[in-house]
Amino acid sequence: MLTQGDYFKIINVNSQQCLAIGSSSKTVGANAIQWTCINTSPGQVWQVRLPYIINHNSGLFLTIPRTGGGSIASHGAVAVQASGISQTSDTTGTAGREQQWGLDGDDHVINLLSGQYLCIGSSSTTPGANAIQWPLTGANGQRWTFQAWDITTNSPA
C-alpha cells in the first residue's frame, strides 16, 4: 500500500532495477537512472508525497525539465532531480507542474505537466539507463512497483 510521506524503493517492472540518482549525487540536474537495487544506496530511496516524489538522499524533486524557453519538454526528455518549484518565473500558471506526478493504478507514474509516463528508454535492462518520459506504449518499461522502505534499517519495511 502506498502511504503518503512514506519511503520507497521504486522498481522498474521490466528490468527489476531501482530508480536512482546516479552515484547518489546531491547535485541539481543529476539524471535519474535505473540501477541494481542495493540496500545501502541512499540515492535509491524516495519519499512519496504526491504529487511529489523526493529523493531521500538529496532532498530534491524528481522532475522533467522544461526546455530553454520554459515550454513543456517533449517525449524522451530525461528525468532529473531539481529543487522545489523550479520554474518561478513562469507566467502560465504551471510553475512546478514538471515536478508533479500521479499514479494511475496500473503501475504507471505520470508527469502531470506533460501527461507522459516515466519509463526506462527502450525498456532497457542495462544498469545506468536513463529514466525518461514517453507517451503510453503498454511496455513494462513504463511500469513501476513501490517497495516500502525503512530508512533506519535500510531494509524493506
Image (tube, grey):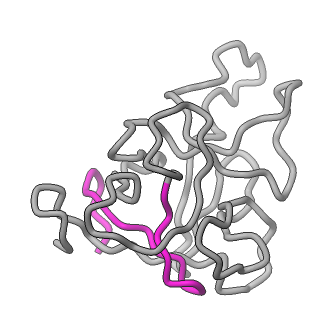
Image quadrant containing the N terminus? bottom left
The residue lying at 42 percent from left, 45 percent from top is 54
Q: Locate residue 4: give its quadrant.
A: bottom left
- The residue at the point 56 percent across, 67 percent down is 34
Please give left or right for residue 112 compared with residue 107 in the image: right
Q: Residue furthest top?
A: 89
Task: Please tell me which residue lies in front, 25 or 108.
Answer: 25
- Expressed as whole percent of the image width and height from the top left, the position of residue 50 reads 43, 50
Q: Nearer the viewer, residue 91 or 139?
A: 139
Residue 72: x, y in percent?
Answer: 82, 40
Q: Is residue 1 above or below residue 94?
A: below
Q: Which residue is pictured at 51% across the width and 69% down the height?
A: 35
In the rendered image of this protein, does residue 150 appear above or below residue 126? above
Q: Tell me if 96 is positioned left or right of 148 in this view.
A: right
**Front-lying residue, 78 or 144:** 78
Q: Quadrant of the C terminus?
A: bottom left
* Residue 47 relative to residue 149: left or right: right
Q: Is residue 44 magenta?
A: no
Residue 134 screen position, x and y as percent = 79, 65
Q: Residue furthest front?
A: 23
- Magenta highlight on residue 13: yes
Span highlighted in magenta in the image: 1-20
Residue 33: horizontal and vertical position, in percent?
59, 60
